[in-house]
Amino acid sequence: MFWRLVKIIPPLRNSESKASGNKPKLDHLEAFKNVPPAEQEKLFLQKLRQCCVLFDFVSDPLSDLKWKEVKRAALSEMVEYLTHNRSVITEPIYPEVVHVFAVNMFRALPPSSNPTGAEFDPEEDEPTLEAAWPHLQLVYEFFLRFLESPDFQPNIAKKYIDQKFVMQLLELFDSEDPRERDFLKTTLHRIYGKFLGLRAYIRKQINNIFYRFIYETEHHNGIAELLEILGSIINGFALPLKEEHKIFLLKVLLPLHKVKSLSVYHPQLAYCVVQFLEKDSTLTEPVVMALLKYWPKTHSPKEVMFLNELEEILDVIEPSEFVKVMEPLFRQLAKCVSSPHFQVAERALYYWNNEYIMSLISDNAARILPIMFPSLYRNSKTHWNKTIHGLIYNALKLFMEMNQKLFDDCTQQFRAEKNKEKAKWKEREEAWIKIENLAKSNPQFLMYIDSSSLSSPMDMETDGPIIEDVMMLKKTVEEEATQLHRDQRRERPLMRRKSELPQDTSTTKALETHRRAEDMIGAQDGH
C-alpha cells in the first residue's frame, strides 16, 4: 500500500532542496478546465506527484526558476480546484495529498538564530523566515482546503493522518517563521476537530512539549500558538471537568507562569486559565494561590502581566470563592501599591476602577480595608510619582464612602500603630545613648572612635507624617480625589510619558541625528 510509504518519510532538509543530484524538471500539465471531467482525477494525481519535487531556495535561490514557477502554478491551481469543485476528493487522492504535505513540510528545523529566554524580544529580534515559503504557503493552503472540503471523509483519511503524522506536525511548531506557525495552528485545530481518535494523543503530546519547555529548554517558538489551540479546546470541554483536565491546568498551565519568556505567550495563557475558571469555579482557589506563589519578585513588567491576569480572574470569580482568597490576594496587592515601579503601582490601583471588583471589596470591606489602608496611606505621602498619589486618594475615597466608621477605625488604628512604632524607636535610641555613654567612660574611647561618628546614634525611620486628625485626612482625600477626576476629564494625552523628568531638547535632537558606526562605514564603502 502506498500509505505505508508515507509513514517512513524522514525529515531531510532545512528548507526545500533538490530531490536528487540531477536537475529537477517538471512538465507543463494541462489546466483542469481544459480536460473532460472523466480525466480530471488522473490529472489531479499527476499534479500531486509533480508537487513532490523539491527545489533549492537556500544555497542557490535563483536556480530552476522555471520549474519552481511550474510547481507554484500547479499548487495554486489545485487550491482553486478544491475550493470550487465538489466530489473531486476520491479515495486514491487521500494518500497522494498526505504524501505531498509530508514531503514538503516534514523537515529538520535549523537552529535558532535568536537569543532565548528573557533576552528574546519579539518586537526587536527579527524571526528567521523560511526561504521556501512561496511553495510552503501554497502546500499549507492546499492541505487546509483538503481538510475543510465537504467531501473530506475522516474514516478514509485516518489511515494516513495518524499519530506519527501528528507528531511530525507538532515538531514544526518550533519554526521561527510566524507565518508557518499560524498555518500550523489552523491545520492542527482542523485535525483535532475531525479525528476524534487523535484528540487524547494531541493533548498528551502538547503536554509533553510544555513539560520540556518548562523544565528543560525554556525555549520553544510555538507556545503561543499551541495555547491558542488549547483555548479553543478548553472552551469545548464537557462538564463536569475530567480529572485529567484539572491536572493539566494545575501541573502544566500554571507552571508556565514561571518561565522567563512569559511575555511572548501570556495573553493566550491567561485566556486558557480564565476558560477553566468559567467552567469550574472551584478551581479558583488553587489557581490564585499558584499565581501568588509564582509572583515575580524582581521583574516589574512580568508583575504587570500577573496583575492583568488576576483582574481577568476576578472578573469571573464567584463571591463564595473570592472569600477564600481575598486576604492573601490583597496582601499582594498592598505590596504592589507600594512598588517603586510606578506601572506596577498604577496597574494595581486600577482595580478600584472595576465595578465588579469594587462590589466584592464592598461586601468584604471589614477584612480588606485593614490590609490595604497602611499601604495606601503611607504611599499617598511617600511615593515618588504624583499620578500614584491621585490614584491612591481615589481608592481611599472609595473606601471612605463604602464604610465611614470602618475607615475611621482604620485611621485611628494606623495612628496608634505609628505612635507605638515611634515609642519603640525612642526606646531604642535611648538604649543606644546609654551604651554610648558607657563606652565614653572608657579612657581609651577616643582612640577608637572617629569624631565624625559622635552624632546621634540613630535617626528614627518613619514612613511619613503620622495622622494627626481624622477629619483632616478625610478632607485631603476628598480634595485630591476630586482633583484627579477633574484632571482625567480635562486631559486626554495622546501618549503617557514614562518619567516625570523634563525633556532635554538638545539630547533628543542629538539622538535623532545620530548615525551608527556601521552605517557610516557602509556609506564610505559605497563611495
Image: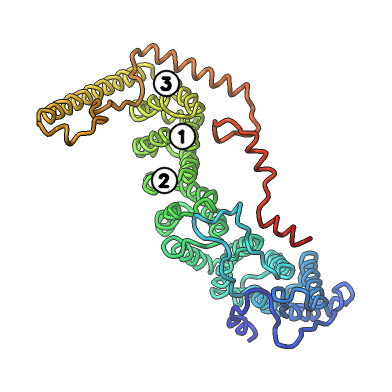
Q: Position of residue 262 (x, y in %)?
A: 49, 52
- Nearer mark to the viewer, of 2 and 1: 2
- Nearer mark to the viewer, of 1 and 3: 1
> Element under label 1?
helix
Question: Is 65 on the left or on the right of 12, as rendered?
Answer: right
Circle 3 residues within 10 Å: few <14, some 14–19, many ≥20: some
The residue carrying mark 2 is 298
Amino acid type of the residue that numbered disc 3 sits on in the rendered structure: Met
Amino acid type of the residue that numbered disc 1 sits on in the rendered structure: Ala
Q: Is residue 233 visible?
A: no
Q: Is residue 240 above or below residue 208?
A: above
> Element under label 2?
loop
Q: Is residue 22 above or below residue 66?
A: below
The residue carrying mark 3 is 402
Question: Is 56 on the left or on the right of 424, as rendered?
Answer: right
Task: Write the residue at 34% across / 35% down.
Answer: 327
Circle 2 residues within 10 Å: few <14, some 14–19, many ≥20: few
Q: Which numbered disc, 2 or 1, marks the residue that appears first in the sequence?
A: 2
Residue 171 is drawn in which quadrant?
A: bottom right
Circle 1 residues within 10 Å: few <14, some 14–19, many ≥20: many
